[in-house]
Image (cartoon, grey):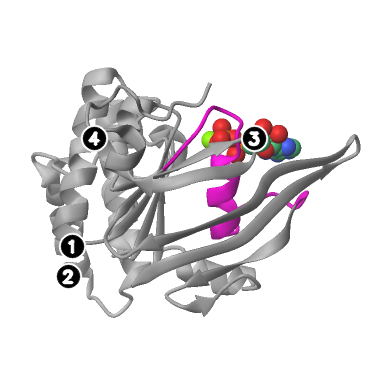
């Protein structure tokens, strides 16, 4: 079954200087439990595509054409209130820079607890705390009890991104949007976080839209891959078909 279907989606920014067509007639489906990589050069429209599905675009951007279906139900015209409900329950997000995603004034445990409370308001304080510890363990953080009391500035970039992933998982999402989630991390840490995402997908069975400009990362992560250029999604297919057998050469790179 498809969890998410996007049909003929076009998104433009309207500035004084004129219209900028950022996403042009994009169509694709996301299957339950799969990792769909969206790949393309910087500026080709990957983030705008993802944000338009989540309705996180600034006011100057408008959806011009198209429809978005979540689990068969159309959500194209959902209000901000309806979208808020989806973000944090069905949809979750992990973006490039964990330090801007985290609140510097709250311990990471409190931030994860808040995400748990939004998803499961019925839980007691005690149950919520247990869930926070579980989530920290799930994302591979040692001494989770101690870590929960720490603030973002006390964490390395990799640790911080693991905490952001824990917050995203608190939602128990059907679809996780990961927009260049390792681009700001050191190479060694980057591969650990990618491994973690692969492992979590297997364990939790969520579908992932994984955005990257890096063909090697794309080849490592993809079940299927969609290639974008200049706002258009011009090719989509199984990873083997797109990247070839010898990863990461012959990977449909966009120049
Ligand atoms: N705030 C904005 N105002 C005007 N144009 C924008 C804005 N954000 C993005 N764009 C346009 O959308 C295009 C795609 O941006 P984006 O989706 O962020 O690229 P990427 O593929 O690197 O994620 C950009 O090249 C730019 O033309
Ligand atoms: Mg981007």
Residue under circle 2? 127
Q: Look at the image and tell me whether residue 51 can be seen.
A: yes
Which one is earlier in the sequence, the residue at label 1 or at label 3? Answer: 1
Of the four image quadrants, the one with ligand 1 is: top right
Which label is found at residue 193?
A: 4
Q: Is residue 46 magenta?
A: yes
Q: Ligand 2: does it lie within 8 Å of the C-beta at label 2?
A: no
Quadrant (top left, top right, bottom left, bottom right) of the N terminus: bottom left
Q: Nearer the viewer, mark 3 or mark 2?
A: 3
Q: CA distance from mark 4 to mark 3?
A: 29 Å
Residue 158, compared with residue 121, is above or below; it is above
Q: Toward which corner of the image does residue 14 lie, by quadrant? A: top right
In magenta, the rendered stretch is 38-61
Labels 2 & 1 near each other (Cβ < 8 A): yes
For residue 107, side relative to residue 202 (left or right): right
Badge 4, how many Cα within 10 Å: few under 14, some, many 20+?
many
Q: Toward which corner of the image does residue 222 lie, by quadrant? A: top left
Residue under circle 3? 230
Tell me what residue is drawn at x 8 percent, y 41 percent: 143
Which one is earlier in the sequence, the residue at label 4 or at label 3? Answer: 4
Tell me what residue is drawn at x 23 percent, y 69 percent: 125
Which label is found at residue 131?
A: 1
Q: Is residue 184 or residue 27 the one in the foreground?
A: 27
Q: Look at the image and tell me whether residue 110 can be seen.
A: no
Q: Nearer the viewer, mark 2 or mark 4?
A: 4
The total of numbered circles placed on residues is 4
Q: CA distance from mark 1 to mark 3?
A: 42 Å
Q: Secondary structure at mark 4?
A: helix
Q: Ligand 1: does it lie within 8 Å of the C-beta at label 3?
A: no
């Amino acid at each position: 079954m498809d969890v998410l279907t996007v049909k003929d989606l076009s998104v433009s920014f309207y500035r004084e200087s004129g219209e900028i067509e950022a996403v042009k007639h994009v169509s694709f489906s996301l299957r339950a439990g799969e990792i769909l990589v969206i790949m393309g050069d910087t500026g080709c429209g990957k983030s705008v595509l993802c944000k338009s599905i989540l309705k996180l675009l600034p006011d100057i951007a408008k959806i011009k054409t198209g429809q978005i279906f979540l689990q068969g139900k159309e959500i194209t015209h959902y209000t901000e209130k309806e979208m808020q409900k989806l973000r944090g329950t069905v949809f979750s997000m992990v973006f490039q820079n964990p330090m801007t995603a985290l609140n510097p004034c709250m311990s990471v445990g409190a931030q994860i607890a808040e995400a748990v409370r939004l998803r499961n308001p019925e839980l007691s304080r005690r149950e919520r705390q247990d869930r926070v510890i579980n989530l920290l363990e799930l994302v591979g953080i040692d001494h989770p009890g101690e870590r929960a009391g720490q603030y973002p500035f006390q964490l390395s970039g990799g640790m911080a991104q693991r905490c952001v992933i824990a917050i995203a998982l608190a939602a128990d999402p059907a679809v996780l949007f990961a927009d260049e989630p390792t681009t700001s991390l050191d190479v060694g840490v980057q591969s650990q976080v990618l491994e973690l995402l692969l492992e979590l997908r297997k364990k939790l069975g969520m579908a992932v839209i994984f955005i990257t400009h890096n063909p090697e990362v794309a080849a490592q992560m993809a079940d299927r891959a969609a290639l974008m250029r200049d706002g258009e999604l011009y090719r989509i297919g199984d990873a083997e078909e797109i990247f070839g057998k010898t990863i990461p050469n012959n990977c449909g790179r966009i120049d």
